[in-house]
C-alpha cells in the first residue's frame, strides 16, 4: 500500500468530525431558541418550566402571544412588503446589469463591473447613512428650487427599499451574470436566423434559460431584505420592519414572544428552501 494512502486513512475521521462540529455550532442556537419559544416562563432562557403555547396564541394581560400581537404582525407584513419590492427591483436591476456586463462591449465594462460590486464591501451602516444624507439633500433641493414635496426621499419605507436595492442588486447581478456567461449564444443566433424577432428570442430561449438564476436571485433578495438590519435602521421611518421592532423590544426586555417569531421565520425559511429544492429536483427529472 502506498504510505500516503495509509496516512490519509488515519485522518479520514477529521472531515466528518469537523462537519459535525460545524453543524452543531450553527444549529444548536437555533434549536435552543425554538425549544424555549414553548417555555412556560416570562423569560426566553433556562430553566425549563413546562411547555405552553402562550407565546404564540395567548391574549392575557400578562402575556400576549405572537398571533395576538398586532404590532408584531404589522411589522411582519411590512417586512414582507418591503422584501417583495426589493426582490422585484433587485432582479430587474441585476438582470440589466448582467446583460450590460456580459452581452455588450461598452467602454470601461470591467470598471463598471467592479463598481457594481462596490456596495458589497461597504458596511451596511455606512451605506445607510450615505443614502440618507444624499436623499435628504436631494429632497431639500427639490423642495427649495421647484417646490416639490419629495416625501419618498425622507426616512420611510420607500427609502428603505431603495437602500436595500443598492446592495442586494449586486448579488442578483452576480447570480444572473454567472448563468448568462454559460449560455450558448448559438441558440439565440439560430432563432434569429430562422426569422424570430429579438423579443420572441428572449421570451422563448433566453428567459427560460435564465429562469433558474432569476428565481434564485429573487429568493436570495427576499431573504436578505427580510433579515436586513444595519441599512434599514438608518433609513426607517414611522413603520418599522420586523428586525427593527425586534431590536427595540430586545432593548426593553426580551420575552419568549421573540423566540416564537424566530420559530415562525425558521419555518418560513425552511419551507422556502424545501420548495426551491423540490422545484430544482423536479426540473432535473424533466430534463
Image (cartoon, rainbow, N blue to C red):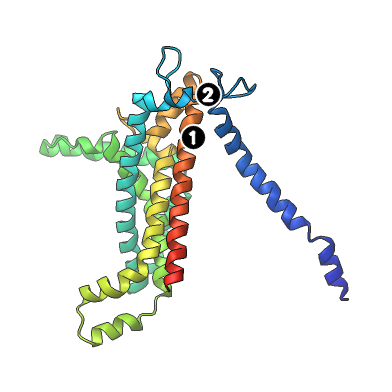
- Give SS at disc 2: loop
Q: Nearer the viewer, mark 2 or mark 1?
A: 2
* Disc on the earlier residue, 2 or 1: 2
Q: Residue at x 35, y 44 (%)?
A: 83
Q: Residue at x 37, y 41 (%)?
A: 130
**Residue 210 percent across, percent down from the top left:** 36, 67
* Residue placed most toward the observer, 206 or 24: 24
**Would you identify the image quadrant in which residue 71 lies?**
top left
Give residue 52's mark.
2
Residue beneath label 1, please? 262
Q: Which residue: 42% across, 52% down?
A: 220
| Residue 42 image label | none
Whether residues under marks 2 and 1 lie with C-beta atoms below 8 angstroms apart, the answer is: no
Mark 1: give few (<14), some (14-19) or many (20+) Cα within 10 Å. Answer: some
Camera sees residue 33: yes
Q: What separation in Å lies between label 2 and label 1 (alpha carbons)?
A: 16 Å
Question: Could you tell me residue 276's position as x and y percent?
Answer: 44, 56
Amino acid at each position: 500500500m502506498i504510505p500516503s494512502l495509509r496516512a490519509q486513512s488515519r485522518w479520514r475521521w477529521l472531515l466528518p468530525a469537523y462537519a459535525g462540529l460545524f453543524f452543531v455550532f450553527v444549529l444548536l442556537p437555533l434549536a435552543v431558541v425554538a425549544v424555549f419559544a414553548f417555555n412556560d416562563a416570562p423569560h426566553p432562557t433556562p430553566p425549563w418550566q413546562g411547555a405552553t403555547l402562550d407565546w404564540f396564541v395567548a391574549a392575557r394581560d400578562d402575556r400576549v402571544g405572537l398571533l395576538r400581537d398586532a404590532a408584531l404582525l404589522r411589522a411582519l407584513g411590512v417586512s414582507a412588503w418591503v422584501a417583495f419590492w426589493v426582490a422585484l427591483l433587485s432582479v430587474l436591476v441585476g438582470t440589466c446589469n448582467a446583460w450590460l456586463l456580459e452581452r455588450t462591449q461598452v467602454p470601461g465594462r470591467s470598471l463598471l463591473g467592479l463598481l457594481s460590486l462596490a456596495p458589497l464591501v461597504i458596511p451596511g451602516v455606512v451605506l445607510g447613512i450615505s443614502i440618507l444624507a444624499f436623499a435628504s439633500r436631494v429632497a431639500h433641493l427639490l423642495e427649495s428650487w421647484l417646490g416639490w414635496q419629495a416625501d419618498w426621499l425622507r426616512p420611510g419605507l420607500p427609502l428603505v427599499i431603495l437602500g436595500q436595492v443598492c446592495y442586494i442588486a449586486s448579488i442578483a447581478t452576480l447570480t444572473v451574470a454567472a448563468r448568462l456567461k454559460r449560455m450558448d449564444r448559438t441558440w439565440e443566433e439560430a432563432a434569429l436566423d430562422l426569422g424570430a424577432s429579438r423579443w420572441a428570442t428572449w421570451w422563448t430561449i433566453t428567459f427560460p434559460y435564465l429562469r433558474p438564476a432569476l428565481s434564485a436571485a429573487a429568493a436570495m433578495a427576499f431573504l436578505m431584505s427580510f433579515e436586513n438590519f444595519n441599512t434599514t435602521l438608518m433609513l426607517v421611518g414611522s413603520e418599522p420592519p420586523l428586525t427593527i421592532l425586534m431590536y427595540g423590544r430586545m432593548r426593553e426586555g426580551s420575552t419568549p414572544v421573540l423566540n416564537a417569531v424566530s420559530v415562525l421565520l425558521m419555518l418560513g425559511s425552511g419551507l422556502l428552501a424545501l420548495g426551491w429544492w423540490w422545484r430544482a429536483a423536479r426540473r432535473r427529472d424533466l430534463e
